[in-house]
Amino acid sequence: MSSKPSKSIEKNGTFKHSKTTGRLSVWTRAFTANSKWPDKEEFLDVIYWIRQILGIVIGIFWGIIPLKGFVALLLFAIVNAGVLYVYFSNFQAIDEEEFGGAWELTKEGFMTSFAGFLVTWIIVYSGLHFD
């Protein structure tokens, strides 16, 4: 008679929520306030992907408004860094020093997010506001 293991592993190597393991998936912890992050790399991955999604959403929004020039670039940097800072300092309430300080978390994935923002912003702005 074979018994199934009590924990199931997803493709990315994290555990699904199980009564026996008590560990939540990465994305469940990402959207749950004050989650515990035993693996620091998982939290940095969450920061990275939230930033990428945020860059694309801001690019769409800035293209629709239409914002342009240095003001749009500056506002992107402020909004992007500000939202992530509030996320990890207030919502997750992590100790920044465990991850190398607030600056390290603030700059995690910023340049790729900026590239995604630029591409999205240019496409949406050009498509809506040029003949």
Image (cartoon, rainbow, N blue to C red):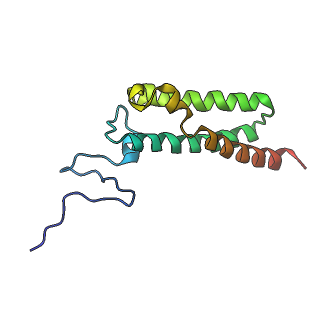
Residue projecting furthest to the right: 131
Residue projecting furthest to the front: 100
Q: Nearer the viewer, residue 104 or 8?
A: 104
Q: Which residue is at a point 12% across and 72% down the rendered structure image? A: 2
Q: Is residue 37 left or right of residue 74?
A: left
> In which quarter of the view is residue 100 placed?
top left
> In which quarter of the view is residue 62 placed?
top right
Q: Which residue is at a point 19% across and 58% down the rendered structure image? A: 6
Quadrant for the N terminus in the image: bottom left
Q: Is residue 119 left or right of residue 98?
A: right
Q: Is residue 20 left or right of residue 77?
A: left
Residue 113 drawn at (x, y percent) = 62, 42
Residue projecting furthest to the left: 1
Q: Is residue 72 left or right of residue 93?
A: right
Residue 105 drawn at (x, y percent) = 50, 32
User: From what the image shows, is residue 59 above or below residue 3?
Assistant: above
Q: Nearer the viewer, residue 103 or 4?
A: 103
Residue 58 drawn at (x, y percent) = 65, 38
> In which quarter of the view is residue 44 placed?
top left
Q: How many marks?
A: 0
Residue 125 drawn at (x, y percent) = 79, 44
Q: Which residue is at a point 34% across and 38% down the rendered structure image? A: 37
Q: Nearer the viewer, residue 125 or 93?
A: 93
User: From what the image shows, is residue 33 above or below residue 1?
Assistant: above
